[in-house]
Image: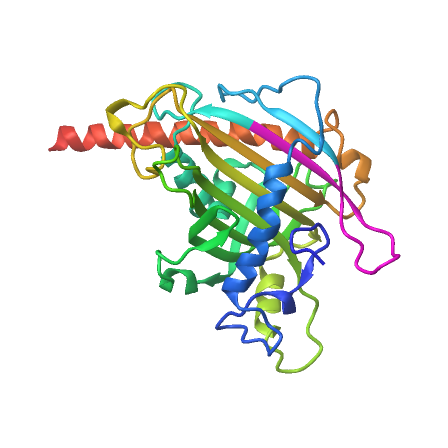
Amino acid sequence: MPLIQLEPHLFTSLPRHPDLPGDANTPDLRGFIHATLLEAQPLLNHFPSTLKPDCKLRPSPPSKAKVKLSRGWRTLQAPQHGSTPKKEFWVCRQSDHEDSDRLAGTVSIWEFHDGLRYNHAEHEMDYTPSVTSVNQLLKWNEPRQWDSNAPITVGNLNYRHFEVELNLIVHTFHPQALIRPRAFISWTMSATYSSSHPASQSDPVSGFITVQIPFYLTKPIIPGSQYEGLYAQIMDAVPKRAVFAYYASVERVELLPPATPLVSGVSSADLNTTTTSPERYLRWTMATTSEAGGGIPKWVQRNWTLGGVPRAVVADVGLFIGWTIKRREERRLERDSQMVEG
């Protein structure tokens, strides 16, 4: 059974955590992350080419970049020989953004890191109107103790700077009397990556990815279960009438090779610089599969005109860019205020 799939996993499949010691079959965190990356990397390399693209690019204001939308079916390997393989409906969007923190409708690599890689779920609540609460259920601090010079390597890419947590995310829709809230339990992992090839060969590939995997927890029936406290925490946070729903996603922001040399000798591998060039582009790719549950028909969830997942993922580009521009202006005003006071 793959890790990145729509069907949610039981909590017994979670990697080892101090609050959930598990048993001899519980995977260690590093091995679990490695297995996740082994699945995520080819998915991101194959999407969106394995899906059917829309006939036109989609606008998502205030983003200057148009969005390429693709959708179609992904066939999973059959769990047993001779059994029928499962199919999942996936939606993928891709957009190329000028790496700039000054031009209208653009976003810099630093702003992508700050808004999408760090505190991914919490920031999603800031710029997505339907996300009304995020409760962190578990956080894995173990990666902070790993030697940064000993990355997890998959193919020719080295992954570092892992952020790993389990969140309960609630979406509330309008009219609330007709559409019940949706609750998602998501294991989220973000990491930076860079090419393992020496920089002298070519501009190194670099960026970051975020993977979200669905989980679910049934009510523990054994007294004293290690999951009793977690179950109570979830049920206390879930609003009344909420429907548990599921989604999986893979997301990547990558630096594209510049058309001309960068100014001031800035390396395209430097993820911390705030100096940006309009000649440097960032490719933002996101692919997701989801199930809203309840009484919403699947064909409605997949429909653009009726406001299904395809329209929502395109709108997310503009929502993130608009939120980023607002944060950029707030920081500028704060700096100006400090200079006046100084």
- The figure's colour scheme reads rainbow
Q: Quadrant of the N terminus?
A: bottom right
Q: Position of residue 280 (x, y in %)?
A: 39, 24
Q: Position of residue 242 (x, y in %)?
A: 69, 52
Q: Residue furthest left?
A: 342
Q: Find the magenta span and give its range.
A: 73-94
**Residue 142 picture location, percent across and down:** 42, 65
Residue 100 visible in the displayed image: yes
The image quarter in which residue 108 lies: top left
Residue at (72, 45) in percent of width and height = 292
Q: Give the number of marks.
A: 0
Residue 117 lies in the magenta-colored region: no
* Nearest to the observer: residue 334 or residue 10: 10
- Residue at 47 percent of width and 61 percent of height: 139
The quarter of the rendered structure image containing the C terminus is top left
Can residue 141 be seen here? The reply is no
**Rendered image quadrant of residue 260:** top left
Query: Which residue is located at x 61 percent, y 31 percent?
Result: 93
Between 155 and 269, the one lying in front of the other is 155
Give the vertical position of 256 relative to 249 (above or below): above
**Residue sitting at the far front:** 201
Residue 80 among magenta residues: yes
